[in-house]
Each structure stands twice: as C-alpha cells, then as structure tokens.
Image (cartoon, coloured by chain):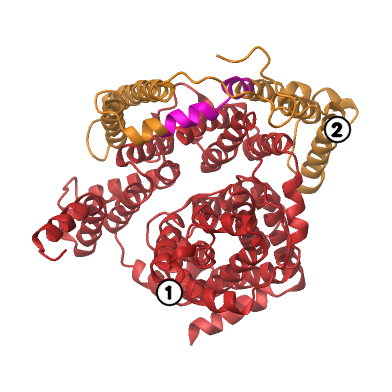
Chain colours: A red, B orange
Amino acid sequence: MDVLADLLGGFANALEPQYLLYAAIGVTIGTLVGVLPGIGPALALALLLPLTYGFDPTGALIIFAGIYYGSLYGGAITSILLNTPGEAGSVATAIEGYPMAKAGRAGPALATAVMGSFSAGIISTLGLTFLAPLVANLARNFQATDYFALMVLAFVSVTALVGTSVIRGMISLFAGLFVGLVGLDFLTGQQRFTFGSAQLLGGIDIIIVVIGLFAIGEALYGLARLQYAKEQAVEFAGRIWLNREERSRVWKPWIRGGLLGFFFGSMPTGGSEVPTFLSYNVEKRLSKHKGEFGKGAIEGVAGPEAANNASFSGVLVPLLTLGIPTSATAAIILSAFQIYNIQPGPQLFEDSPDLVWTLIASLFIGNIMLLAINLPLVKLWIRILAIPKTLLYTGILVFGILGVYSLSGSITDLLLVCAIGAAGFFMRIYDFPVAPAVLGAILGPMMETQLRRALSISQNDFSVFFTRPLTVGLLLVALAVLVLPAVLPRLLRRVKRTDPVG
Amino acid sequence: MSLPDSGPSGAHALVRQETRPGAGMLGLRIAAVVILLGAAVVLIDAIRISISGGFGPQQPGFFPLIVGIGLVGFGVAFLVRSTLKPDRALVEQADEEHRDTHWRTLWTVVVALLVYVAVLDPLGYIIATSIFFVGIARVAGSRRLIRDVIIAVLFSAAVYFGFTELLGVRLPDGLLETVL
C-alpha cells in the first residue's frame, strides 16, 4: 500500500504544530472573507494570494487549503441567510437553504451544509488520494493531441452544460481565449494583441481576470442595485444541531453529493456548477418529501453543498496530474504553485512527492479544522453580515485593487482590472456566463501550445487528431456534449409520440 | 431619467425610476454592437499578426485568427438574437436588470475607480484609499460621514502597515513619504 505510506508521510509533514496553526488561520481568514456577500472561494483565494508570499511552499499550500474550505463555508452562510451565493457552486444551496432560513431553520441548514461538506470532503479527498497516482501514471503516456482534445472537451462542457445560451457562452469563451493570447508568443516572440503597450508584453495574469470579473464586477453590480435594495437578511435564532429526523434525511444526500461532486469535479467540466445542480435534481427526484422542495427541503441543502466541497478534490485530479486547471479556483492554485516554481503534471508525483502528499494531507486537516473551529462559532460569523452593504462593497473594491496592485504595482494592470470589472458587470446583467471566459483565459494558451506541438511533430498533418484512439474518443465525447442537449429532448419527444401509451 | 436627487437617505428611500419599455432590448443591442466592434478589432489585429508571422497552423497568427473568426461569428449570432429573432427570456431578464440598476451610481463608481487608480502613486496608499472609501460609501448611500471617515482611515492604515511590514509588499507612500 504505497499510497497509504505516502499519505502518512504527508500527514507527518502537515501535522507539525506550526502547520496546524497555519491551517487554523487559513480556515478562519477564509471564512471571514467568504462570509462577505458575493465572495466565493475563487475570489477569496485570489484576494488572499498576497498573504502567502511570506511562507514556504508547504505552509502556503496548507493556508490555501484552509482558506478554500473556510470560504466555501462562508459562502454557504451567505447563500442560506442572504440568498446571495458568491459563486456558481453555491447557487443550488441557496434554492432550499434560504427558504429554510426564512422558516426559522437557519441553524440546521448551516449545520447540514458544514457537516455535509465535511463528509463529502473526506470522501472526495480519499478519492483524490487513490485516483491521482493512477491518473498520473496514465498521463505519462499522454501526447499533445490528447491534451488538446481534453481542453476541447473542457471548453465544450463548460459552455454547453453551464448557462442558458450557447451563443453567449461561446462569446464569453472566445473573449477569454483572446485575453489569454495577449502578450509575447512563446515560440516566436512575436507580439500579439499588445496594441503597442509594453506592459502587456507579459500577458494578462489570470488573477487580474478573476479579481476583475468576480470582485470588481460583483461590487459594481451590488453598488448599482443598492439604491433599490430590499433588505433580505434573515434573523438567525434557534438550534444549530440537527435533530433525529433531519439526521436520517441528510446522510444519504451527503454521500451521493460527495460522489457526484468528486466524479464531475475530476472530469474536465469546469468545477462545481454541474455537480451541484445535478445533485439538487437527484435529491429532488429521490426525496420522500418532494412537496417540501422549493419551500426548504433539507436534502436540497445537504446534497449540493456536499457536491460543492467534493468537486474541489475532484478538480485537483486534473490539476495535479495533468497540469490542467478546470475551474477558476484551480487556476488560482496553479498561480500559487507557479510562484514557488512548482509545475503540476505527471512529473509532479515523482519530482516532489512530499509536497503533493502534504497538500493532500492538509486537505483532510482543513476539513477537520472547518468542522472543529467554524461550526461552534457560527453565531460570531453571522455578526459580519451586520456590516452595512455600502461599506462592504466599497471594501471589496479596495481589496480587489489592492490584490492587483500587490501582484505587479503596475497602473496598466489596475486599469485592466477596472475594464474587466465593467465587462463583468454587463455580463452579469445580460446573463453571459463567466465560467467560460475564465476557463478560456486559463486554458487557451495551454491549448495553443499543445496544438502547435502536435502539428510540429506531425509536420502540419492534421490527421494526427483523428488517428489516436484516445484523442478521437475525447473529441467524440466533446461533440456529444455539444450536440446532445439540443437533440436529446427532440428525440425523446419523438419516441414519446410514437409510443401510444405515453 | 434619474430623479433630481438620486442620493437616497437610507436604504429604501429612492422611488423606483419609471422604466422606459424596451430598455433591456436597447441595452442588449448596444451590447451586441460593442461585442462586434471588439470582435472586429481582434480579427483585424489577428490578420495583421498573420501577415507578419505567417498563416500556417504552427505560426503565431493561426490561433488568434480562429479566436477572431469565432468572436465575429458568435457576435453576429448574438446581434441576430437581439434584433431579428429576439430571445424573449433574455430580453425580459435584461428589462428587469435595467429596472434594478441605478446607472448614475454605476458610472460614478467606475469613474471614481479610474481616478483612484491614477492618484494611488502620487497621493500614496493611505490618503488615496481613505478618500476613495469615504467617497464610494457616500455615493452608495451611506450618510454617516464621521463613522465612514474613521473606518476608512483605520482600514487603509491597517492594510498599509500590514502589507508593508508583515508581508513585504510595497505600497506607495505618496505625500506621507517623509512621515512613514
């Protein structure tokens, strides 16, 4: 059992007192930031990235894991109490969580979310522990065409499965690809889309994109609506712990959500949005209390929140083993890796096993910290919601600018983040999905590299994309994902029509 | 249009603007045109890159060309969906968003952000951030000036010292250079 020995080694590293302290600090700060309305895990990590500059790689990653889990929990608090999910992953939580809170059951809703996150986090981190080494092994034989096909699949699934319109999703995706192309071409050194600006030669950092779209865009949206805002906060009172009936209703959704989250998280489908909504629908279908759905069914909080947490460990599978970040959160973590000159990919498990296993161990520790520290403190966290909205959104703007300034100190970057923020505002009101843009900006450059590498090996022969079985398989899946949602309902209708009974 | 005094005194004071019917549709059309203009710029620059770097699939212009063509193509599709064949659900949603958006606040904040970015270096982090903070809070509807000023100064000073002393990130001193 190599894996277990490695994992134990990771625990031995991560359990040092100073690292435990870091984990506790990370979880606390993460919750503090995540509980601010409109801030989800990706943004919390982007804003708090400067905090890790002073630490060694292991310490920084442990703090990061803590911040991630903390902000996820903070996001659940705001989804449930304020109905303002900070990120796509917690939208499904708010559907049942907010009605539960309105009915005076905020405590059980939060407890379900936290304990569900915990169970799912353990399930999916175990999944990561055993799956990642296998995938890393397989990935050693991956070729440029396979990587290219994987990224096509990622793009297609994030645009077709997420959001309401393929046209708007594609515009968002291509805009992201454009942002990713800005700068010097890595092969020839030619300037692309720099429009004569020397500051743009190095490209646009993904952190700028994330802070612009999520922090500045979100704060603009909040401020512009504040004038008409209806106060939505729900009083928090009553018990926190689950009673016997609730306990018996939530443990199955936790496990199902955890499995769904891990499975879809580890696929290249862009993180938590797909599994959380899938989990919501599954629980709705399987529940014995269908009538409660929409009015505060506890299963509808338990499943999606578990899936939300579990998808993170899932996303780490392609990130650590292939070096492909499939969600905004993963992209920020990749940036953090790069600060320390760590390149994720099949080699990572061979080159720096200590780091990988310490990271995985710290995920377990972060989960436990979350349960131990945060659940008892829930009444304290809720105080943060009393901060006036005017100061809150102003603070988010200031933190966003600060986060970008501490990256480079360049005025060009600051102007860029404002422009991206304004774009984010309009994307929000005209219902353009944000995830494809983020993914395009992250994966676009990698995709181009793999495409050009594949073509240079084959000497401009495009047939390489249609002769390797793995590549063809991935491309076919991508085609299916793109076409099926449009065709399937029509086919089903036709089947129904020919069926005399139905 | 905006009411003469659109700074509300409190959270709920403002009377909702009379919305012109079709504001959402107009907004969508403007968005479509802006997207197409941007797409055209991208495509033209991509062609320029290809002319100087070559059109081959391994050359630096190949991927930008695909992106430019994609943007123009889907931009046109979006224009069609907001003019000839309007997407009803989207138009309704855009109408609602337009109704809930206080445009003057939005543009004021955007301009304030740009000014803040421009004066960050000359004024220094603490002064620029304090002024920005108080100003935005006021634009957003806060009417407790003294509280806001105290919070703004404490907040920006805390950030400044935390970042420069603890994290080693340099923030501009500006006017306070001699003091700090």
The amino acid on which the numbered mark 1 sits, given as a three-letter code, is: Leu
Does residue A139 sit above or below A389 in this rendering? below
Q: Which residue is mark 2?
A: B147
Does residue B142 sit above or below A497 in this rendering? above
Q: Which subunit holds the residue at mark 2?
A: B
| Residue A174 screen position, x and y as percent | 35, 37
Q: Which residue is mark 1?
A: A131
Classify mark 1: helix, strand or loop.
Answer: helix
Q: CA distance from mark 2 to mark 1?
A: 53 Å
Question: Quadrant of the rendered structure where residue A138 is?
Answer: bottom left
Magenta stretch, main secondary structure, is: helix
Q: Are labels 2 and 1 assigned to the same chain?
A: no
- Name which residue lies at 28% across and 34% down: B70
| Residue A131 screen position, x and y as percent | 43, 74
Question: What is the magenta range?
Answer: B93-108
Question: Quadrant of the rendered structure where residue A396 is?
Answer: top right
Looking at the figure, which quarter contains the C terminus of chain B? top right
In the depicted view, which residue is nearer to us: A387 or B157?
A: A387
The amino acid on which the numbered mark 2 sits, given as a three-letter code, is: Arg
A61 sits left or right of A162 in the view = right
Looking at the figure, which quarter contains the N terminus of chain B? top right
- Name which residue lies at 66% across and 49% down: A48
- Residue A347 visible (yes or no): no
In the depicted view, which residue is nearer to us: A334 or A498?
A: A498
